[in-house]
Image (cartoon, rainbow, N blue to C red):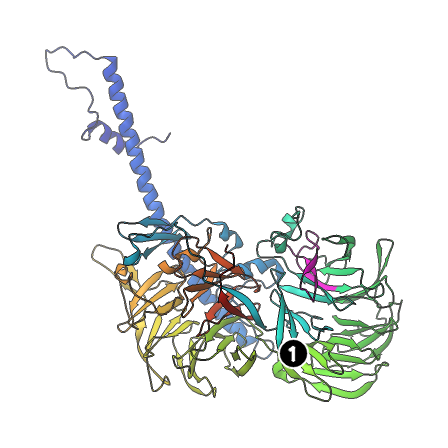
Amino acid sequence: MSEEPPQGANNRMFNGPGGYRGAPKMVLGASPPPVTITKVFDAWNEMIENENQSLRDRVADLEKKVHEQTDEIMCLRSTLADVLRRISTIEGARALANNHAGGRATPTKDTVRLRHNNSDSARDVSKRASSYLPGRSPSNTQIRAKEAQYNAEEGIIKMYLRGRPINLYVPTPMRETYVPNGPSSSPPAKLKLEWVYGYRGRDCRNNVYQLPTGEIVYFVAAVVVLYNVEDQMQRHYLGHTDDIKCLAVHPNKLLIATGQTAGHDRRDARSWRLNPPSDPLSPEAEEWPHIRVWDSVSLNTLHVIGISDIERSVACLAFSKADGGSLLVAVDEAPDHNMSVWDWSRGERGYKLLETKCSADQVLAVDFSPVDRSTIITCGKNHISFWNYESGMLAKRMGIFENRERPKYVTSISFTDAGNVISGDSNGNLLIWQRGGNTVYKMVRGAHDGPVFSILVQKDGGIITGGKDGRIVEWDRDLERTGNVIEIPEQYGSPRVVTSGRGSQLVVGTTRNCVLGGTFTFPLRPVMQGHTEELWALAPHPGHHQFLTAGYDRTCYLWDTMAHTIVWSKDIGEHAQSAAFSNNGEIVIIGTTSGRWFVMDSETREMYSQHQDGNEPIQVLKFSPNGQYLAVGSRDNNIYIYQVSEDCRKYTRVGRCQAKVRRARYQSASSVGHSSFVTHLDWSADSQFLQTNSGDYELLFWNAGLCRQIAQTSQMRDVEWATQSCTLTFATLGIWPEGTDGTDINTCAKANQMDLLATGDDFGKIKLFASPACQQRARCLEYGGHSSHVTAVGFLQDDSRMISTGGRDTAVMQWVVSSNSSSSHR
């Protein structure tokens, strides 16, 4: 090193013990001792060696200080995150109060931490943002985790998350044989998607159709559902990796095209679109925004279109009709809203015939004329456009409203059998545009009170429209009212899409994520229901094949896994964050984002009581195995312990496991308890202890009855835990992939009777491990379907099924658990 040592170092070298002391003093009258070149070199080498040793000591001291400061910085980050979160929560509460009269400001995964822009440009942050820490940028996922270190003598393995060390104690029976990097067992079971609850109607259009097979096709998250209502059977197309945004059915009613957004690892489209993967069916290609054309009978993917051509996501799709469906038109959600026309059947990737900028404003719908092969119509914000495709060129004419009221949005379009265009707009009006023209031929004012979301032209020429006013109206072919009107109950939302079912039946997709079926004579009944806002709470029933979900839409649903129906629903009036059944299943506890939690009868839905613990979200609720205690984990860093009595109807607070500060003599203050918000907790099998995780990657242990932290964590190495929901424990070491930053895994759950562990992560993936997963990077099986962060997983009481919930995708998925005798592992 070129840096000069400090003066003190030189003094030590020349005068310290064992150092070079210089030439001896001369004795009066004595002649100086002879000095040889060898002695000079020896002295010089000794000085250099001492210099190097001093520098090594300094570097070691500096490395130690840097490591200590890294931990301090992590604590400061956590504290700052907590402050920012609290500010965000206060701002969110104010916005909620200000918007109460109009639209409600709904908290999302990020609003509990930091508010992010909800636009697609910030979608990577909101989708992959930490489940518990604020403002995590996607680049943070590239931080490589430090390799875990194992001290075999003490039986301690030290793992690192974001540079923070976490000590995990190896159970006594395993200490002699444990090898952190040893081979791990394959999971003893595998999953198969059995049922998907939910539908995406809140922001998508024209995405429900009846197929000749009798199935209704629609999508939610990254799954296309083919649902036979009569036979109560679902099939699932699972080719997509992220949010499906649009769907089109080929004129032959057998082929289907669906378009998705960019996957989790392919957000920055502009930087990678010039280097598309060579194989369109490769796993790499699945992360690009693209269109899939597939067979609805075999569910086989036929063509993957648009890789490297679509920048952000596919907004809308349509097959051509006049030529039997040989062409496919797609509109990108990129700023230029590019429209491309494809000869979709030419090769695996199809063949792009042309591409052009469609509109500077949002495009809501696109469609081909049923009589003119070359005519395409697009509509959206401030426009309706008439396109003519000839000789590889597109000619565009804007719709002219003349002296008529120009709408802010043209919200829907359809064609009559004669080729005329019918459009609906945000003013509630219907307009007819004659074939080949771009001027209004006829106008029906006030068809709906508000935007017209859907226009259905039936085979006999009759017309049915659905609007934001919650009404479905029937018209004759001349747009005269027939008098038939359906009023959709407010709880189901407004009709987003109306399509023909069997015979005279209608199938309706609504803005509150419901699919309804019925006629003008018989009332509409729900075919499928789902949550409408971010979903976090999941509680499997302890005695029945049922489970409860609750979310930010303020609604709790109890689902029956055998009948695939809702047993009951309950509006609790607050954003739900967590839930738990009592051990006998008679009581359900619902925790909210305001710090309030409710005690409710699981059959009658009667509210027995409500309690308040702080003003922060109740992150986790869990009854002790003996049923005598309830642990309430809060985002205010505390765990509240309650004594349970009167058949789980009365709750008396025992105490609070909280952060305290102690100051030893001659020492700085140190924290006892969690310094960040509680994320997970587990009871010991004997109901005496708790293990808890927090947002700053802590694993702490508590004496539940005394509400005191157990400082000697090595004493807890052999404790048997009733559940395994904490993600940071010795038993879950292997669930953390290489390069993780500590927040990628949101949830985990161990099966009740099987040695099986399931996890859900920020990438929409569910993974199965053998339990305990204590070897690093343990082998697993991986499953897709969710398009958002997986917020909860849980096994039914007999382990026959597993349930998973998505955050923003609002989907609830039911998986069959079966023996893994022939499945491969990852």
- Residue 318 quadrant: bottom right
Return the x and y of residue 295 as percentages of the image width and height: 70, 63
Residue 578 in sight: no
Residue 486 vertical placement versus 808 (above, below): below
- Please report the residue visible at 89 percent of the width from the left and 69 percent of the height from the top: 435
Return the x and y of residue 475 as percentages of the image width and height: 81, 83
Return the x and y of residue 649 as percentages of the image width and height: 37, 85
- Please report the residue visible at 42 percent of the width from the left and 81 percent of the height from the top: 585
Disc 1 is placed on an element classified as loop
Residue 10 on the magenta span:
no
Count the labels in the image.
1
- Residue 393 quadrant: bottom right
Relative side of 739 to 325, left or right: left
Front-most of 344 and 616? 344
Relative side of 61 to 445, left or right: left
- At label 1, the amino acid type is Val
Front-most of 694 and 79? 694
Residue 333 vertical placement versus 284 (above, below): below
Return the x and y of residue 345 as percentages of the image width and height: 77, 56
Task: Name the outermost residue toward the front.
Answer: 821
Residue 253 in sight: yes
Residue 671 vertical placement versus 401 (above, below): above
Tell me if mark 1 has few (under 14), some (14-19) or many (20+) residues whose alpha carbon lies within 10 angstroms of its own. Answer: some
Front-most of 148 and 130? 148
Residue 302 on the magenta span:
yes
Q: Which residue is mark 1?
A: 229
Please state, as top left, top right, bottom left or bottom right, where the N terminus lies in the image.
top left
Range drawn in magenta: 288-317
Relative side of 586 to 786, left or right: left
